[in-house]
């Protein structure tokens, strides 16, 4: 097994990077905090009882902010992790590049395998790991790209892929092809890869930046807020206009059903969804708005991580054990469903979130890396043992 090397910009003594917080390897604290928030947000999306879509004028709907956005934050952070594995600000070349590709593909295979095992539990949770692993595979051709090129690719993808995905779904519907495992993962599932590649490209670009720099953090935050305002703002305006007319190019739209059947339900997208910024509609407006939300959260966590490191330790520990924590929560949901405890109230979420924070903190302090994280690191490093050194994990 390869020893973890020092990667430029990661293991040096710079603000926000710790060789022993929360689990070694020169991890960037803010990224673990953001990943911890994403994990808890996905818990909330699966367990919270929320009376409706997010409405800033109705405080009881505010918890709905976790819907869709948490999983997108998780996907963007996947891209950041891939950037770190492949050299961060200076993409690796030669043998290290080959190692990085092998490690990424090995991790992808293991993540998909774990996701398949969780799918076999038949819980109401829309398991993200299959799509997550596929994003790792999709990232391989882009490992040598610079941050500007990755951001341009993400922008083009955000504009075009939702439209192409919609045409693909319409074509399959008209051809009466139905949904196979492949088409579900690529087009019509909860996390369609054709759309979600945008978040991977965005995260890969973010990971190529000097994330410890306060200037970079500020710019990320400002860009994130701007994109969120653009995506959600324009989406709300367009949705209001479409809702008022009820037609698109003279054809009536089923606005009621489309507002409820985004890709998260596994249903084919309704045409009206193309104009909505609601979670899981897969529209350009949602992609842009939620990408901005993810950037803003990451920027805030990067700033807060080194300044509030003790207070944020439980979140960072959870983020460092994200795969373990996510997988464990699926078993909790299975148990709750079998005992008719799902969606009675919000108590289950708070017990699970609190228990996860405590468990991950204790595990990190005593044992370090999480069990599934340890498995991924060990297997992927052994697979990449072709000489030289291997980039760090995150």
Image: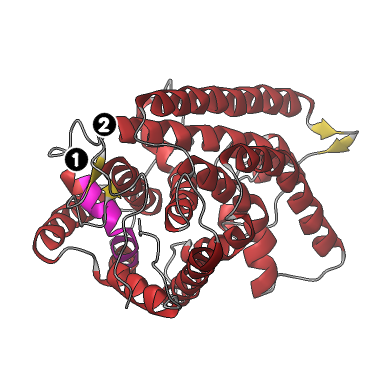
- Residue 316 at what x, y percent from top left? 24, 47
**Magenta segment range?**
315-327
| Residue 46 appears left or right of 283 | left
Classed neighbour count for the residue bearing mark 2: other residues with Cα under 10 Å, few (<14), some (14–19), many (≥20): some
Residue in the image at 35% along x and 55% along y: 394
Q: Which mark is residue 258?
A: none
Main SS of residues in magenta: helix
Classed neighbour count for the residue bearing mark 1: other residues with Cα under 10 Å, few (<14), some (14–19), many (≥20): some
Q: Is residue 25 magenta?
A: no
| Residue 283 appears left or right of 392 | right
Helix, strand or loop status at disc 1: loop
Helix, strand or loop status at disc 2: helix
The residue wearing badge 2 is: 304
- Residue 325 at what x, y percent from top left? 28, 61
Q: Nearer the viewer, residue 392 or 31?
A: 392
Which residue sits furthest right?
A: 250
Q: Is residue 384 above or below residue 291?
A: below
| Residue 342 appears left or right of 203 | left
Q: Nearer the viewer, residue 193 or 376?
A: 376
The residue wearing badge 1 is: 312
Q: Is residue 225 above or below residue 288?
A: above
Q: Is residue 267 visible?
A: no
Which of the two discs, 2 and 1, labels the residue nearer the N terminus? 2
The reply to whether the C-beta atoms of the residues labelled 2 and 1 are less than 8 Å apart is: yes
Say which quarter of the image contains residue 267.
bottom right
Residue in the image at 84% along x and 59% along y: 171
Residue in the image at 65% along x and 66% along y: 184
Q: Is residue 318 magenta?
A: yes
Q: CA distance from mark 2 to mark 1?
A: 8 Å
Q: Is residue 92 above or below residue 69?
A: below
Q: Is residue 42 visible?
A: yes
């Amino acid at each position: 097994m390869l020893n973890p090397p020092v990667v430029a910009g990661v293991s040096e003594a710079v603000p926000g990077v710790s060789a022993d917080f929360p689990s070694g390897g020169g991890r960037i604290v803010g990224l673990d905090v953001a990943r911890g928030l994403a994990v808890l947000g996905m818990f909330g999306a699966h367990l919270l009882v929320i009376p409706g879509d997010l409405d800033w004028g109705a405080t009881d709907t505010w918890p709905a902010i976790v819907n869709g956005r948490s999983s997108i934050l998780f996907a963007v952070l996947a891209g950041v992790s891939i950037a770190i594995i492949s050299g961060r600000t200076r993409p690796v070349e030669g043998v290290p590049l080959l190692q990085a590709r092998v490690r990424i593909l090995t991790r992808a295979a293991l993540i998909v395998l774990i996701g398949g095992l969780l799918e076999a539990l038949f819980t109401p949770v829309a398991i993200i790991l299959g799509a997550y692993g596929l994003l790792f595979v999709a990232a391989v051709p882009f490992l040598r790209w610079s941050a500007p090129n990755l951001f341009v690719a993400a922008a083009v993808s955000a504009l075009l892929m939702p439209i192409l995905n919609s045409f693909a779904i319409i074509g399959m519907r008209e051809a009466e092809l139905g949904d196979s495992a492949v088409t579900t993962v690529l087009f019509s599932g909860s996390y369609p890869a054709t759309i979600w590649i945008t978040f991977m490209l965005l995260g890969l670009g973010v990971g190529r930046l000097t994330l410890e720099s306060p200037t970079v953090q500020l710019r990320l935050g400002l860009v994130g807020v701007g994109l969120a305002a653009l995506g959600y703002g324009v989406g709300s305006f367009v949705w209001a206009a479409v809702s008022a007319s009820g037609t698109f190019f003279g054809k009536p739209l089923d606005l009621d059903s489309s507002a409820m059947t985004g890709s998260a339900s596994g249903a084919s997208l309704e045409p009206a969804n193309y104009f909505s910024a609601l979670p899981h509609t897969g529209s350009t407006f949602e992609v842009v708005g939620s990408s901005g939300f993810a950037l803003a959260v990451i920027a805030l966590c990067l700033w807060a991580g080194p300044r509030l490191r003790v207070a944020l330790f439980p979140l960072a520990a959870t983020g460092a054990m994200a795969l373990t924590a996510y997988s464990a929560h699926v078993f909790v949901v299975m148990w709750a469903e079998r005992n008719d405890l799902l969606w009675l109230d919000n108590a289950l979420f708070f017990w699970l979130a609190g228990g996860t924070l405590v468990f991950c903190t204790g595990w990190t302090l005593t044992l370090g890396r999480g069990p599934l994280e340890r498995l991924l690191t060990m297997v992927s490093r052994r697979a990449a043992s072709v000489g030289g050194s291997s980039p760090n994990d995150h």
